[in-house]
């Protein structure tokens, strides 16, 4: 990078954001160290356009192709990500490949095979309330020659909620917008995950609020795979049911996007090369421009001269926005994504394919002598590229993860020393399951778990008007560990007696 000194005001933004710390402010001007790798970070944050890239690559510099940034790394220096070093003209990963043997101490031990599955589930078990009572079922059996105990309860959890994943690129509302169930606030839209829309519903603060009953009910209805109607503040109306496609504003969603517009470039590059002189994949996250993208460059596709009306991220990658149009953006007429063409590069007769990341909509254009694109009928090669995208997409569906914090009644009824149980769960000496389904236990204090509701028997969840949701919980461990935790040994029953019921 080069500093244009008469524009630089020494604000320091470039120095603050430079990932390698190669910029300093001297006499109120930015000064760039010789180790600069042209990652363009400073260029993107400079408010005065006082920086520009030096086009000439210096001797010994190696261009990195391991991500879209494409750093130009001087000898013995690392790129912006600090992963690759230029050693004698070759890029070398600066830490060696690790075998599992090298990391197994960090990963930690897995559960012993004998305690991986509970002897019984908590479904239909009843509860321990008021906490100190022994769990309703404490069962023992030999598994692989090991004495194993499973303790079960249906635990009322005030600290509980549900995360809902909606596979669609259709915009449903702004991130952070409130979500309503029967005109009561039950949660909010949270950050997207790979394009899927995510709802965070419930949680202790909403459960204990004035609309807690509605909150408890909506958590359980979704967890029990019932159909639920939701309304987003200043956004869409949703009908969702776990396992089914979502219905958004009366429209049944068909496909989940295959990836962002940039990912599509790499996934379908050979098809795009045959489809048109230029391909644009419109997406609310990253819109891709094929001939400028590294995928197009690698396939020897010359730059088309097409200029997009969007904020540039890196080569061939442009930030999108959210709206009701193509690819979940505000663009309702696809050609509106094109700002113009570079007339020194583009040529009349050049073809352009524009599509979405689901392949559900596409349009084909040809550049006229007026240097404007005019829509034409889709030729076979372009149609094939669109069909490949569409056929690679998964079906749109709704999924949900129940989240709970196992507190008093979920621990004191299991053992007399609840802290020992918490430690045992984190140390994988006691396995927590929900309705027999595996859970992910969040690190840190307490026992906060997540479970895929599709692995739990339908109608296993319920709620009480405290308000709280009720989940079937099982703890499975070696009997000797259970006794050491202050387990209720006097309440243990042989599994054979339970099995006969």
Image (spheres, helix red, strand yellow):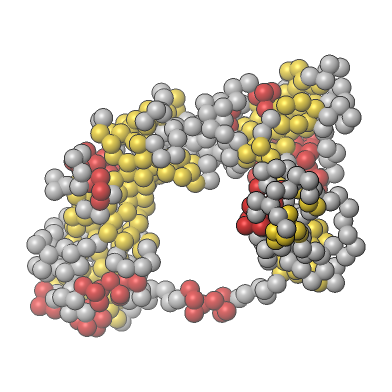
Rendered location of residue 383, percent (x, y): 70, 28
Q: Please report the residue visible at 57 percent of the width from the left and 30 percent of the height from the top.
A: 329
Q: Please report the residue visible at 31 percent of the width from the left and 82 percent of the height from the top.
A: 145
Rendered location of residue 119, percent (x, y): 25, 67
The picture quadrant where one finds residue 379 is: top right
* Residue situated in front as seen by the camera: 189 or 312: 312
The picture quadrant where one finds residue 372 is: top right
Most distant residue in the front direction: 27
Depicted 359 relative to depicted 314: above or below: above
Judge left or right: residue 372 versus residue 96.
Answer: right
Rendered location of residue 115, percent (x, y): 32, 73
Judge left or right: residue 154 versus residue 430.
Answer: left
Depicted 263 relative to depicted 112: above or below: above
Depicted 427 relative to depicted 199: above or below: below
Q: Quadrant of the C terminus?
A: bottom left
Is residue 317 shown to the viewer in this render? no
Depicted 183 relative to depicted 81: above or below: above
Number of numbered callouts drawn:
0
Is residue 331 shown to the viewer in this render? yes
Rendered location of residue 56, percent (x, y): 89, 53
Judge left or right: residue 98 versus residue 107.
Answer: right
Q: Please report the residue visible at 52 percent of the width from the left and 35 percent of the height from the top.
A: 169
Judge left or right: residue 456 versus residue 497.
Answer: right
Q: Please report the residue visible at 49 percent of the width from the left and 76 percent of the height from the top.
A: 106
């Amino acid at each position: 990078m080069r500093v244009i000194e008469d524009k630089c005001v020494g604000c320091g933004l470039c120095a603050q954001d430079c990932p390698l710390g190669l910029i300093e402010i001297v006499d109120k001007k930015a000064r760039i160290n010789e180790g600069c790798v042209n990652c363009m970070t400073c260029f993107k944050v400079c408010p005065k356009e006082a920086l520009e890239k030096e086009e000439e690559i210096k001797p010994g510099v190696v261009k990195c192709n391991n991500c879209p940034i494409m750093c130009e790394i001087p000898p013995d220096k690392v790129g912006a990500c600090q992963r690759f070093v230029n050693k004698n003209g070759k890029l070398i990963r600066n830490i060696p490949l690790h075998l599992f043997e090298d990391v197994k101490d960090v990963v930690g031990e897995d559960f012993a095979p004998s305690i991986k599955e509970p002897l019984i589930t908590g479904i239909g078990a009843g509860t321990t309330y008021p906490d100190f009572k022994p769990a309703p079922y404490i069962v023992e059996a030999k598994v692989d020659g090991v004495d194993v105990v499973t303790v079960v309860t249906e635990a009322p959890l005030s600290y509980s909620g549900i995360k809902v994943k909606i596979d669609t690129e259709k915009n449903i509302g702004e991130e952070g917008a409130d979500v309503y169930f029967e005109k009561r606030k039950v949660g909010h839209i949270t950050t997207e995950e790979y394009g899927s829309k995510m709802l965070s519903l419930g949680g202790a603060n909403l459960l204990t609020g004035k609309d807690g009953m509605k909150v408890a009910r909506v958590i359980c209805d979704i967890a029990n795979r019932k159909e639920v109607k939701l309304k987003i503040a200043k956004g869409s109306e949703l009908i969702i049911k776990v396992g089914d496609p979502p219905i958004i504003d009366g429209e049944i969603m068909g496909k989940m996007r295959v990836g962002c517009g940039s990912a599509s470039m790499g996934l379908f590059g050979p098809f795009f090369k045959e489809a048109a002189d230029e391909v644009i994949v419109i997406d609310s996250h990253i819109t891709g421009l094929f001939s400028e993208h590294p995928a197009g460059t690698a396939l020897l596709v010359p730059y088309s001269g097409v200029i997009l009306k969007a904020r540039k991220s890196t080569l061939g990658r442009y930030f999108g926005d959210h709206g009701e149009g193509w690819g979940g953006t505000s663009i309702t007429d696809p050609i509106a994504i094109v700002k113009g063409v570079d007339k020194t590069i583009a040529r009349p007769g050049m073809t352009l394919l524009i599509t979405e990341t689901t392949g559900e909509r596409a349009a084909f254009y040809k550049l006229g002598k007026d240097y404007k694109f005019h829509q034409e009928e889709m030729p076979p090669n372009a149609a094939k590229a669109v069909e490949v995208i569409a056929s690679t997409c998964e079906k749109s569906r709704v999924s949900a993860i129940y989240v709970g914090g196992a507190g008093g009644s979920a621990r004191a009824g299991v053992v007399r020393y609840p802290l020992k149980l918490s430690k045992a769960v984190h140390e994988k000496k006691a396995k927590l399951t929900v309705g027999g389904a595996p859970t992910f236990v969040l690190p840190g204090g307490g026992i906060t778990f997540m479970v895929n509701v599709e692995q739990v028997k339908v109608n296993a969840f319920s709620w009480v008007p405290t308000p709280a949701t009720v989940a079937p919980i099982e703890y499975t461990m070696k009997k000797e560990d259970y006794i050491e935790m202050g387990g209720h040994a006097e309440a243990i029953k042989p599994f054979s007696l339970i099995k006969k019921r």
